[in-house]
Image (cartoon, helix red, strand yellow):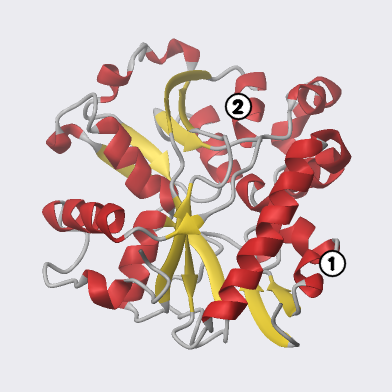
Amino acid sequence: MVRDTTVRLFHLPFSFMLPQRVASERGYFAEEGLDVELVERDRGDVDWKYIPAEETLTGDHDVDLYPICKWESIKRTWDMDDGRVVAKGTFADQPYTIYVRPESGIESPADLANVPVGVNERTGQEYTVVRALEEHVAPEAVELEHHGMPTDRLRALRDGECEAISLLEPQSTLAEHLGFEPVLEFENHMGIVGATDLEGEAFDAFMRAYDRAVRAINDDPDAFRGEYLSMLEMDAQVAPELFEEVDRDALLGEIEVPRYETPEPADREDMSAHLDWMKRRRLIDGTADIDVIMGPTAQ
């Protein structure tokens, strides 16, 4: 166990990050000798993405660890020198889903060729949507549009501003209660980025506490249902009109706490393959070096 190590941990108030809050609130980090401070942003103040696009977390915000999409972890560490990639995983049994209006005529993933899909740019879905669609349509037929946060994307689909959007749970269940139809599911890929001076023992302690939270949730998901649903309640505060269109009790009753997974140390071969794809797609500088992107805990 490490002793009295302070870790500023950036927290995303999304469904796949519930173990971070559980480990903090139930003292699992503290029992590992970590004084963890969750760094959060007010949901009402976020109009694009939770991860600041123009500021570094490890530098400008003095953050020691932050979760982010696997591809964006590669881009931020190279383009912005914002830490080093130290871990990866799916984090939870929760796929992304692309939804369309029932009258759209879109019935299969192949029908999404040249159809702009609403995403939140420079977040996990931008990259995962592209990778997923490339399995069904030609790369040049993949089109994306920025439509902001989940509630913004739901409004855009409802109002006919876009033909398709990507979502995670619990907003996926909300979409279905609003009458939208799923046409494609695909895995959510995440990573963890650490400051360059983060010590190995501190990171190992973080992972042990995180794993303990994962096991606690998976052993008794109903005990954490209130905390899980609170994330949807935040959406109800910023977009109440969406919830007025559905049976709220039926919506909440249908949502289940997912099964969580503990992140694994970043794998060099795996990350190199993602980096090569980003270079082919011209999503990152062709000179990007995996040895600069990955941290010392990488395998």
Distance Cα–Cα, label 1 vs label 2: 35 Å
Say which residue appears at 52% left-offset and 60% top-offset.
Answer: 49
Looking at the picture, tell me which residue is in the foreground, 67 or 122. Answer: 67
- Which quadrant of the rendered structure holds the N terminus? bottom right
In the image, 247 versus 28, the foreground residue is 28
Closer to the camera in the image, 64 or 242: 64
Name which of mark 1 and mark 2 comes first in the sequence. 1
Viewer-proximal residue among 37 and 272: 272
Q: Is residue 105 visible?
A: yes
Rendered image: mark on residue 175: 2
Measured as percent of width and height from the top left, residue 150 is found at 57, 43
Left or right of residue 167: residue 111: left
Report the residue marked by disc 1. 27
Q: Quadrant of the C terminus?
A: bottom left
Q: State the residue at coordinates (49%, 31%).
A: 157
Secondary structure of the residue carrying tag 2 is helix
At 35% across and 15% down in the image, what residue appears?
Answer: 106
- Please provide percent x and percent y for residue 261: 59, 45
Q: How many other residues sit within 10 Å of disc 1, few (<14), some (14-19) or many (≥20)?
A: some
Q: Determine the image quadrant of residue 125.
A: top left
The amino acid beneath tag 1 is Gly
Find residue 260 and report its image quarter: top right
Residue 78 in the image: above or below residue 130: below
Q: Nearer the viewer, mark 1 or mark 2?
A: 1
